[in-house]
Image (spheres, helix red, strand yellow):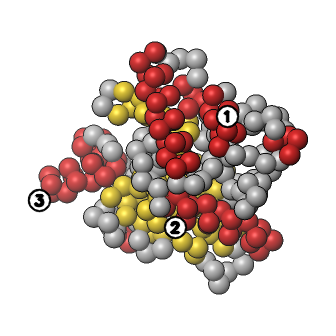
């Protein structure tokens, strides 16, 4: 029975069994349910991956979905920043309808701590062991380059066929990881724009991936996405 538990936990934590046992003995992992930090009484935190200002990225276990491993994004907003919540939430609501191997799958999103002065939007996504594409630049073999390129074009084609734009393609918001001995890519998110295709979050003028016409008319379309992807 103990062996089964160890194997199960090792699989969830993506660790070797002997390493898990060593951590347990050193009291560096939770020894009981009461020691586990829960988010929204659903997600059990495994690991802090990133924490920058008002954003946190956690590796968690979804207790309501057969203990599936997920990534949990936490966006924290003060009362002064409340107007930023709705556009961001709408972006992820749109993405939740997407189902494509080259786009990160979103399973759940919710605003918590609504009664408090500070609010938190969490977004639960698939767990994809990866790095941003930026770290692969200049060090990619031809077969991997072709696999990456085909995946990116397939994902963007899917987004456009859904009647959406990306608006902010660059090598820092595309994930790249190995799967079955080849590199695959996934779009992390899409840009936020209004009914006139004007980005809600103004793109920085020094962004080399932005189509030139944006700086003149501040409007993007499908061709703009293709330009950014080519760059």
Residue sitting at x 80%, y 34%: 212
The foreground one among 34 and 10 is 10
Viewer-nearest of discs 2 and 1: 1
The foreground one among 67 and 222 is 222
User: How far separated are the C-alphas under marks 2 and 1?
Assistant: 28 Å
Is 94 situated above or below 64?
above
Q: Quadrant of the N terminus?
A: bottom left
Q: Earlier in the sequence, mark 2 or mark 1?
A: 2
Secondary structure under tag 1 reads: helix
Secondary structure under tag 3 reads: loop
Q: Quadrant of the C terminus?
A: top right
Please indicate, yes or no, whether residue 109 appears anywhere in the rendered image.
yes
Q: Earlier in the sequence, mark 1 or mark 3?
A: 3
Mark 3 neighbour density, 10 Å: few (under 14) some (14–19) many (20 or more) = few
User: How far separated are the C-alphas under marks 3 and 2?
Assistant: 35 Å
Across and down, in percent, residue 127 comes to 41, 49
Residue highlighted by disc 2: 109
Is 136 situated above or below 212?
above
Quadrant hosting residue 134: top right
Viewer-nearest of discs 1 and 3: 1
Q: Which mark is residue 35?
A: none
Residue 73 as seen in the image, left or right of residue 102:
right
Mark 1 neighbour density, 10 Å: few (under 14) some (14–19) many (20 or more) = some
Residue 229 as seen in the image, left or right of residue 25:
right
Please indicate, yes or no, whether residue 25 appears anywhere in the rendered image.
no
Do tag 3 and tag 2 residues touch (Cβ < 8 Å)? no
Residue sitting at x 15%, y 54%: 4
Across and down, in percent, residue 195 comes to 72, 62
Q: Which mark is residue 228?
A: 1
Q: Earlier in the sequence, mark 3 or mark 2?
A: 3
Residue highlighted by disc 3: 1
């Amino acid at each position: 029975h103990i062996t089964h538990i160890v194997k199960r936990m090792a699989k969830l934590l993506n660790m070797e069994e002997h390493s898990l046992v060593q951590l347990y003995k050193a009291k560096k992992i939770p020894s009981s349910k009461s020691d586990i930090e829960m988010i929204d009484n659903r997600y059990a935190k495994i690991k802090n991956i990133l924490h920058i200002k008002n954003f946190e990225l956690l590796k968690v276990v979804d207790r309501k979905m057969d203990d599936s491993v997920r990534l949990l994004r936490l966006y924290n907003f003060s009362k002064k920043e409340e107007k930023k919540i709705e556009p961001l939430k709408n972006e992820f609501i749109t993405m939740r309808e997407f189902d494509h191997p080259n786009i990160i799958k979103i399973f759940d999103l919710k605003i918590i701590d609504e009664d408090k002065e500070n609010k938190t939007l969490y977004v639960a996504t698939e767990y994809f062991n990866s790095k941003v594409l930026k770290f692969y630049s200049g060090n990619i073999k031809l077969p991997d380059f072709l696999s990456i390129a085909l995946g990116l074009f397939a994902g963007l084609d899917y987004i456009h066929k859904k009647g959406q734009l990306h608006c902010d393609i660059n090598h820092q918001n595309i994930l790249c990881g190995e799967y079955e001995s080849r590199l695959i890519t996934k779009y992390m998110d899409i840009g936020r724009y209004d009914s006139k295709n004007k980005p809600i979050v103004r793109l920085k003028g020094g962004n080399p991936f932005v189509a030139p016409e944006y700086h003149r008319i501040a409007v993007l379309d499908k061709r703009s996405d293709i330009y950014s992807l080519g760059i």
